[in-house]
Each structure stands twice: as structure tokens, then as C-alpha cells.
Image: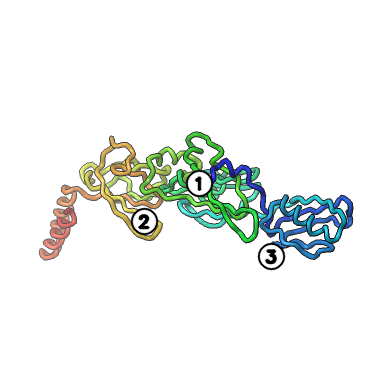
Amino acid sequence: MPAPVELQHDAYLLGPGDQLELKFFDAPELSGTLEVLNDGTIPLPLIGSARVVGLTLSQASQWLTKLYTRQLQRPELLLRVVRPRPMRVALVGEVERPGIYTMSANETTQTEGGPAITVSGLPSIVDAIQKAGGITLNADLRTVELQRRLPGDPPSFKRTRLDLLALVSEGDQLQNPLLFDGDTIRVGRAAEPVAEAIELAAANLSPQVINVNVIGEVKTPGKLDLPASTPLMQAVLAAGGLETWRGKKTNIELVRLNRNGSVTRRRFRLDLAQGASNAQNPPLRDNDTVIVHRSSLAVASDAIGAISTPISGLVNIWTLFRLINTAN
């Protein structure tokens, strides 16, 4: 794949919607403003129309000069873009809201839960990712791929591998090229949450706030707004911590709805001294649910309370049996 530095030398390719100015030095009456039509052609005096889609300005100028040599003795012309077309780029993979986005020189971008950012100037790959809501926790910033069209017709493309981790950690601006119309950005998926997830949560490429449900034997159960990539143990603390004797420290369950519709369930032991770890104290994602199950003492207490309720003996025995089984 080409190196990111080579992207800096890419030339603008003409496409439908571009407004051009064609100026003849020796025949000013032929000069005027043209617009590239949906079929990729421009209407021309004397000639009729010519196809310019996918050409650079230099290539289009040479092509028009060649066409006009049939009508003019020594055509001298200047072709320039006076109003570029809207820039549409596609974002796929591990971004919050994949899709096609229209970018302009004046953009307002915003990651999930983060502040709105006004961008002036030509948009870059970071601007596009921010407009798509930022990266997901599973994003692998080392394997971001940019696909770009090459000059010529029919269309052909090149692909460049970018390392956005070097951008956010070292400030390598070569990893943040300017975008062209028709670019496709693919953010790869890591095999497991990356080790730098906590540090990346502070970068403006990531959502700033996540919503997490913490239920069960905690002091203030319910939905919480937490900083992105908050570890599991800190989420339990944010819910007030375990009920003194009712919460079971060895049975903290994380229920996660995956983007493909599947659900994963993992169990952890509460250890407040444990740092962020994918194996022991995983960073949380938006819409995760944390369940703190009851301790054996809480199960027994609830069973005694149920038995002491004035209900038939058969129902009491069944309730006790069900509660005890729940604890296993």
C-alpha cells in the first residue's frame, strides 16, 4: 500500500457538480462558466460536450486543448475550478454511526457526548470520524484504511494504510490527510479491546460519555452517565458500591449487547485494587449492563422473609426452594 506521505501529492479529480471557468486568451467570446453534469460531461461552445469526470485539471486542460485544435488554429486556454462540488465520503467499520457523509469547508463535528467542534478549512480524516460520532471501543487505530479514486476513466482505486494511534499519541500529521470526494474510510476491528483504550477515551476521536445500567445489590441502582471506557469496578463504585452484606463480590456480571445483535455475559470478582484490564476489569461500552448478584446471606434472608409471610406452607416451601436455587 502507498505510504501516507504520498497522499499529500494527490490531485483534485473533476466530478459532477463542479463549477468550472474556461478562459480562452485569443477568443474571449468562447470563455465562460461551465458545470460538470451528472453524466460527467461539460457543455462546450463549438464542440458540444466533452467528458471530464475523473480527470485532473491538468489532464482536462490538455484534453480540451486537443479537442479545440480541430476548431481553432492555436487554442490557448485556462481551466480552473471556481466552486467545488459537495464532498461525500463513506465511513465503515468501527465508528459509532457508519454511513455516507457530506463534508464541506465549514463543518460542525461532534463525538458522542462530546462538545460540538467547528472546523474551518478543508476536512480531514479526523473530521470525518468525528462527524460519524467517533470510534468504538473495538476500533484498531493502527489499521485505518483510506480508499481513493485514481485519475482516469473507468474508475480505479488505491488504498493507503493509516496509523491514527501515531496521530493521537505522537502528533504525526501525515496520518491525517485531507479528504477527497468519493473517499472511503475503513476503521478496522481489534481482536480484543486495545490496551490503550483508557488513553484513547481522552482523545477527541472517542465518544466522551457512555450510558451504563448498574442494577442489583448496589446502593443506587439505575442508569448512569459515565466517562467513556470507564472500567467495570469504577462503575460499581459510581452506583454507590455494594450493599454492605447483600452484594456478592465474586459475582459481578457484565451483560453486553453486540452490534451484530448477539449478547455476551461475563462474570468478574470485585477487586477495587485492580487496574483497567480486559481480563479482570474491562472498560465499559455504551449500553452495557452491570448486575451485582445477591450474596448467600441475602438469599437466605430473603428466603426467611418469604417463609414468614402468611401464605400456605406449600407456597412457602416452593419459594424457599426457588430462592436457594437462584443462589447456586
Question: Do tag 3 and tag 2 residues touch (Cβ < 8 Å)?
Answer: no
Q: Quadrant of residue 303?
A: bottom left
Give the SS element for disc 3. Answer: loop
The residue positioned 60% from the left and 45% from the top of the image is: 178
x, y percent for residue 270: 26, 42
The residue positioned 66% from the left and 54% from the top of the image is: 86
Looking at the rendered structure, the kind of residue marked 3 is Asp
Q: Quadrant of residue 63?
A: bottom right
Q: Earlier in the sequence, mark 3 or mark 2?
A: 3
Q: Residues within 10 Å of mark 2 (few under 14, many from 20)?
A: some
Which residue was labeled with disc 1? 161
Question: Do tag 2 and tag 1 residues touch (Cβ < 8 Å)?
Answer: no
- Is residue 92 among the parts visible in the rendering? yes
Q: Nearer the viewer, mark 2 or mark 1?
A: 1
Which residue was labeled with disc 3? 39
Up-down relation of residue 310 to residue 241 (above or below): below
Which residue was labeled with disc 2? 257
**In terms of depth relative to the viewer, which is nearer, 212 or 17?**
17
- Is residue 239 among the parts visible in the rendering? no
x, y percent for residue 266: 28, 51
- Measured in 3D between alpha carbons, the distance from the residue under mark 1 to the one under mark 3, in whole angstroms, is 32 Å
